Amino acid sequence: MQTIQELQEQLKAVNDAIYAIMVGGQSYKIGSRSLTRANITELRKIRDDLEARIAANNTSPLLDDCYVAIFDGR
């Protein structure tokens, strides 16, 4: 099982990869050399999974991504 620190490091790496694609593009070619980065859709799925795994380790009494609103009176 991975520690929170390992998950956070992986999340940072995935966010860096997503940022590189957003700034530099999915792929490019210089002369006869070409570079294709990871699929941004897959990176986003991995990011969502890592965020969920990190959130699952929180000791919050509420459910993950759950918000409560109280409307009192009118």
Image (cartoon, rainbow, N blue to C red):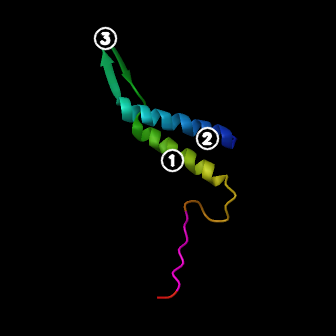
How far apart, in angstroms, are the residues tagged by discs 3 and 2?
Answer: 37 Å
- Which residue matches tag 1? 48
Real-space Cα separation, disc 1 to disc 2, in angstroms: 12 Å
Task: Say which residue appears at 51% left-offset and 36% top-offset.
Answer: 14
Q: Mark 3 belongs to which amino acid?
A: Ser
Stretch of the chain drawn in magenta: 66-72
Q: Is residue 63 left or right of residue 23?
A: right
Q: Earlier in the sequence, mark 1 or mark 2?
A: 2
Give the secondary structure at mark 2. helix
24 above or below 50? above
Classified by dominant secondary structure, the portion drawn in magenta counts as loop
Residue at the image position 38 percent from the left and 35 percent from the top = 22
For image coordinates 31% across by 18% down, the residue present is: 29
Q: Which mark is residue 19?
A: none
12, 49: nearer the viewer: 12
The residue singled out by tag 2 in the image is 8
Mark toward the start of the polypeptide (1 vs 3)? 3
- Most distant residue in the front direction: 74
Q: Badge 1, how many Cα within 10 Å: few under 14, some, many 20+? A: few
Residue linked to disc 3: 32
Please tell me in which quadrant of the rendered image residue 42 appears: top left
